Image (cartoon, rainbow, N blue to C red):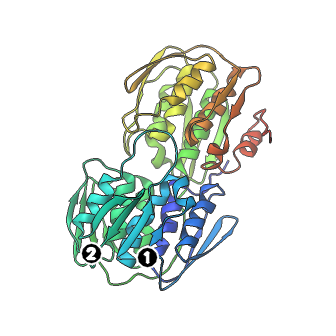
Amino acid sequence: MRVDGAKNSVLKLMAAALLAEGTTTLTNCPEILDVPLMRDVLVGLGCEVEIDGHTVTIHTPAELKSDADFPAVTQFRASVCVLGPLTARCGRAVVSLPGGDAIGSRPLDMHQSGLEQLGATTRTQHGAVVAEAEKLVGAEISLDFPSVGATENILMASVMAEGQTTLDNAAREPEIVDLCRMLRSMGADIEGEGSPKITINGVEKLHPTSHEVIGDRIVAGTWAFAAAMTRGDVTVGGIAPRYLHLPLEKLKLAGAQVDTFENGFRVVMNKRPKSTDYQTLPFPGFPTDLQPMAIGLNAIADGVAVVTENVFESRFRFVDEMQRLGADTSVDGHHVVIRGIEELSSTTVWSSDIRAGAGLVIAALCAEGTTEVRDVFHIDRGYPNFVENLQALGADIQRVVG
């Protein structure tokens, strides 16, 4: 099983193409629903965007529109990442407040504060964030929390600001590193990506580029947990295992055999998993996007475990659906206690977000009987060919239309 490019990277890379007039090409793009949505956002801003399988080609004009105020923007969270590049290129950005997964509050305070420290004025009006700046100037910016989205917007706004910007407590996720690699190939002067402090020396102009999207560590992690939960044997390629160091170590603690190689890993589980505690944290901590899989694993594990959610306060909506499958769980604030049982039972469940949907499908593979998972359009936003890939791995699963 080979994973495609990362959802959490490709959408931001598409936004970065706004920074340079000309044609930018992205390869290894995942065939997921959010990519055409981001295409619609860019087209609305004046770009021409072509999607050909795993390749996205973006033709960015000399004059961009500055108002991203149309239906596509409100359908998914990543659309807010056009705020930084539009402010840098146009001196003005109007971005409708984004939609996305129902996993809790994700305010834009840090995005706006970062732009203001660079010299922009921001406000929220008529359901949109408005940023305006005659000129952006480098600044020393410190984030209260290592927000991925705020780090990305500040990066893309500061690459053409006058002078030097330092960003402290920056997000360290591999997708941030991928964005910095692309910006550097466009002519940006950036140092320190992957560390808590990033330094950006502004340049006058960027140029278009070609860039290969980093592999999706969350999709890879999903297949790793699926192997452990179903007592399977899965080899995953297309991802550097160091990006999943902690999740793979946790699977070892649960009793799985994990072997890593340069661009992938293998997970083998031939017994019932052992209960293991988890707490989600920004990278290099355990990813919040794999929290549903951690709960699913513990639901059928031997023993009692606690999973703590430190990133999004509403991500435990998934637990209600796991209880419908028979999981013995109880929620206390941002902790959930899971008492493992040997087998789940089938029923109808509803997915509330991308990762919850995937987690419910994987859990259903561990349930007696036939389970129906509803609202699977969420899964399609983040997992290319989800059903087909599970079928290729031996799962008895089918998509029912209508």
Q: What amino acid is at disc 1?
A: Leu
Kindly indicate the quadrant of the structure image that contains residue 387.
top right
Kindly indicate the quadrant of the structure image that contains residue 131.
bottom left
Foreground pick, 203 / 377: 377
Q: Position of residue 214 (x, y in %)?
A: 52, 59
Position of 129 with respect to 370 (left or right) is left
For disc 1, the marked residue is: 19
Give the residue at the far front of this rendering: 126
User: Mark 2: few, some, or many residues within 10 Å (few <14, many ≥20)?
Assistant: many
Picture residue at 27% right of the left edge, 61% below the top: 114
Picture residue at 64% right of the left edge, 55% below the top: 33
Label 2 close to label 1 by CB (< 8 Å): no
Q: Which quarter of the rendering shows the C terminus? A: top right
- Reading the chain from its start, which is encountered first: label 2 or label 1? 1
Picture residue at 50% right of the left edge, 40% below the top: 102
Q: What amino acid is at disc 2?
A: Leu
